[in-house]
Amino acid sequence: MSTPTKINLDESEIPTRWYNVVADLPEPPPPPLHPGTHQPATGDDFAALFPKALIEQEMSAERYIDIPGDVLDVYRLWRPSPLFRAHRLEKLLDTPARIYYKYEGVSPAGSHKPNTAVPQVWYNAQEGIRKLTTETGAGQWGSSLAFACAQFGLECEIWQVAASYRAKPYRRTMMEIWGGQVHPSPSDVTDYGKQLLAQDPDHPGSLGIAISEAVAEAVEDPTIRYALGSVLNHVLLHQTIIGEEALLQLAKVDETPDILVGCTGGGSNFGGLAFPFLREKLAGNMNPTIRCVEPAACPTLTQGEYRYDFGDTAGLTPLMKMHTLGASFIPEPIHAGGLRYHGMAPLVSHIYELDLVEAISIPQTECFKGALQFARSEGIVPAPEPTHAIAAAIREALACKQSGEERVILTALCGHGHLDLASYATFLAGEMQDLELSETTLREAMQNVPIIES
């Protein structure tokens, strides 16, 4: 009997715990540092930004953390998400490889981001917070947080990277439908935004700048807190429900992956899929190759330096040990707005330094070529971000065609591209260009990275 195309779980099989990979790593990750003293940050250093429960999760080494019942109730609107066997793509590529993808585009916001937006809002609501601020690039995170705030009655204010704000107006509309207030970043709302606009009225913005604006707004009022959609430990923790479900689904068809590939910008989608499989690999239960896939225009792991840097451009956040292109780095306006971040999640950076995962970068035209092959065979139009993982999976599948190997490939399709059709129009018109990171740009941005004495 052939493997079914769609592998489902019952609602009763939704995982009830998140997995914390820190518990199983051979070395603990380096701690965040206070931006002024350069000493290890304490919970108090995060108190103006996050509720106590999320700070505890950020610093936890506990292997499993229970998912609150109210969060599970909202998760049930779309979870468990399906795992698909890409039979039609396999046929198109004429490959003996078996390709599986975990599809997170079934969420209300159309991406994996609500997996962390919902618990973040819930924990803030438990502490009586009335409003959350945040940044967003392409808009998946901003729309997810607006959706989650609507579930628990919180206000939501969002700074969207200006290049994406202009290119993706319907993402803004989606945020506003759920009650979010949206500004282009740099904005005329904060002093930092005004300063940047005075220098360049057409500033394209960056996630680092948008974070600075959202943080500046949050720290001025004790009834407002900040929410981050990627990078931090507690965010990746919440996303592990993806990998935990995928393990259960693959077990139903008696499969284990030989290679796992995930698009990697800040790290939440990749960590969410990969960390539970890394746990099984470290325990000796399977041995997949685990590979991060990032854009050639923002190659944080493959070209960035592993050192302490700020998470935002204005230098308001604690310093984190991560692969960075420099907090002042302004990435090219590639279509995968969600992957345009100067730093990589400290946890992903740490496991990369431990040689537990690999990393490659792929230019965007190859990604969109793969996206068309995927859409025309599997039927789903991918968001620009997961096209990077699709391109990597296609590379692997074609290598199997050459070698005759029957490898199992797993990836996460972290969102649909229904609100990204302008990007596809650009590609179909032959107007999309590959944008590479120049050595000059990298050197200039890295000059502003603080030097931390060891």
Image (spheres, helix red, strand yellow):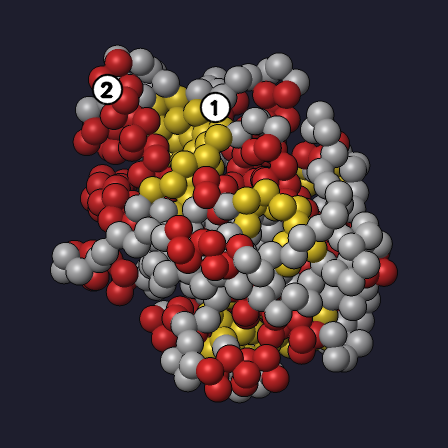
> Does the rendering let one see residue 127?
yes
Q: Give the mark count.
A: 2
Give whichever of 157, 150 is nearer the camera. Answer: 157
* Relative horizontal placement of residue 52, taking residue 318 as reference (left or right): right
Q: Which residue is mark 1?
A: 289
Q: Amino acid at mark 1?
A: Thr
Q: Are marks 2 and 1 in contact (CB under 8 Å)?
A: no
| Residue located 22% across and 41% down the image | 373
Would you identify the image quadrant in which residue 354 lies? top right
The C terminus sits in image quarter: top right
Would you identify the image quadrant in which residue 47 lies? bottom right
The N terminus sits in image quarter: top left
Q: Amino acid at mark 2?
A: Lys
Q: Which residue is mark 2?
A: 401
Tell me the number on the disc at residue 211.
Answer: none
Q: Is residue 53 above or below residue 197?
A: above
How far from the left and from the top, in percent, is residue 407?
37, 18
| Residue located 55% across and 58% down the image | 447
Element carrying mark 2? helix
Give whichever of 394, 113 is nearer the camera. Answer: 394
* Residue found at the very far left of the displayed protein: 429
| Residue located 54% across and 69% down the image | 209
Element carrying mark 1? strand
| Residue located 21% across and 29% down the image | 93
Give whichever of 206, 371 is nearer the camera. Answer: 206
* Relative horizontal placement of residue 442, taking residue 233 as reference (left or right): left
Within-10-Å neighbours for mark 1: few <14, some 14–19, many 20+: some
Within-10-Å neighbours for mark 2: few <14, some 14–19, many 20+: some
